[in-house]
Amino acid sequence: MLQRLGTSKFRAGFVLSSKDRAYARAKGRATIDRHAHEMLAKRVGPAQPYKDGKQTPWRGHPVFTAQHATATCCRGCIEKWHHIPKGRALTVEEIDRLAAVVMAWIDRDLTRHPDVPGAADRSRSA
């Protein structure tokens, strides 16, 4: 899935900010994975999410950035990229699958950007 998303110039342009990387490393993978599940369930899980298409902030948490990078930010993107139809609530299995994509993207970003104290923030401005 990450390879396919990488073919989109828009999706491929996202990287975590140094602040989000530090947060993800400090909290640990298990906590960020729990956050991903919670945020996906709350923000895109319902059949008719509140303010669908605008409900996911562009920054402020590593999961938010990852949601835009992985097309899990709104039901329209989820339908287009993940082939899960709009108009019905996501199942637990679908949320698990989307969270796995989000976490794979975060893992990849953290690997590509090792923790270097004092490194300049090269994140994308949104």
Image (spheres, rainbow, N blue to C red):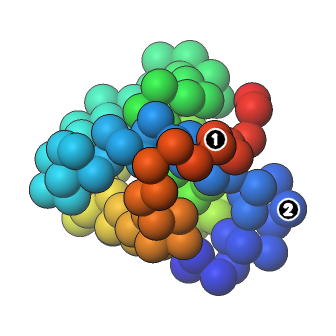
Q: Position of residue 107 (x, y in %)?
A: 39, 68
The residue at 68%/79% (across/down) is 4
Q: Which image quadrant for residue 35?
A: top left
Q: Secondary structure at mark 1?
A: loop
Q: Which image quadrant for residue 61?
A: top left
Asked whether 4 or 50 is in front, the reply is 4
Determine which residue is flagged by label 1: 121
Is residue 106 found left or right of 34 in the rendered image? right
* Number of numbered discs visible in the structure rendering: 2
Name the front one of labels 2 and 1: 1
Q: Position of residue 115 (x, y in %)?
A: 42, 58
Q: Position of residue 42 (x, y in %)?
A: 30, 30
Q: Residue furthest top?
A: 51
Q: Position of residue 58 (x, y in %)?
A: 61, 29
Q: Is residue 80 visible?
A: yes
| Three-letter code for the amino acid on which mark 1 is drawn | Asp
Asked whether 23 or 2 is in front, the reply is 23
Q: State yes or no: discs 2 and 1 in contact (Cβ < 8 Å).
A: no
Is residue 121 found left or right of 104 in the rendered image? right
Q: Secondary structure at mark 2?
A: helix
| Three-letter code for the amino acid on which mark 2 is drawn | Lys
Quarter occupied by the C terminus: top right
The residue at 63%/41% (across/down) is 121
Cα–Cα gap, marks 2 and 1: 21 Å
